[in-house]
Image: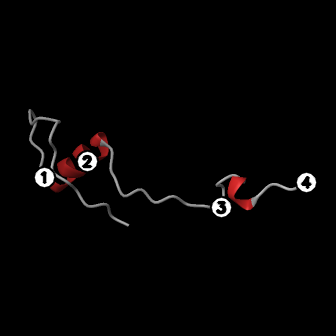
Amino acid sequence: MSLHKSLKGSTKIQVRRNVMKRHERIDKMIKDGNWKKGDKVLGLPKTKIEF
């Protein structure tokens, strides 16, 4: 009996995320100069992901 192709591992698939984690967003904002020390970490503005 063989395994259905949808049940096989996702080793062939490269997943592209369209959402950044909070620390990634802060790192990008620091790099772009939009983050000041002492700013709130909640309610961050949206940042674009570079492909």
Q: CA distance from mark 4 to mark 1?
A: 57 Å
Amino acid type of the residue tagged 2 in the rendering = Arg
Mark 4 and mark 1 lie on one chain; the one further toward the N terminus is 4
Amino acid type of the residue tagged 1 in the rendering = Gly
Mark 2 and mark 1 lie on one chain; the one further toward the N terminus is 2
Q: CA distance from mark 1 to mark 3?
A: 37 Å
In terms of secondary structure, where does tag 2 sit? helix
Q: CA distance from mark 2 to mark 3?
A: 28 Å
Q: CA distance from mark 4 to mark 2?
A: 46 Å
Image location of residue 7, percent across then percent down: 71, 53
- Foreground: 43 or 34? 43
Q: Which mark is residue 25?
A: 2
Q: Which residue is identified by label 4?
A: 1
Amino acid type of the residue tagged 3 in the rendering = Lys
- Apparent side of residue 33 relative to residue 17 in the rendered image (left or right): left
In terms of secondary structure, where does tag 4 sit? loop
Query: Which numbered mark, 4 or 2, is in the foreground of this view?
Result: 4
Proximity of marks 2 and 1: CB atoms separated by less than 8 Å = no
Q: Which residue is identified by label 3?
A: 12
Q: CA distance from mark 2 to mark 1?
A: 12 Å
Mark 4 and mark 2 lie on one chain; the one further toward the N terminus is 4
Image location of residue 12, percent across then percent down: 65, 61
Examine the rendered structure and indicate whether residue 39 appears above or below residue 4. above
Crowd band around label 2 with a 10 angstrom C-alpha radius: few (<14), some (14–19), many (20+): many
Q: Quadrant of the C terminus?
A: bottom left
Q: Which residue is identified by label 1?
A: 33
Image location of residue 8, percent across then percent down: 72, 54
Amino acid type of the residue tagged 4 in the rendering = Met
In terms of secondary structure, where does tag 1 sit? loop
Crowd band around label 4 with a 10 angstrom C-alpha radius: few (<14), some (14–19), many (20+): few
Q: CA distance from mark 3 to mark 4?
A: 22 Å
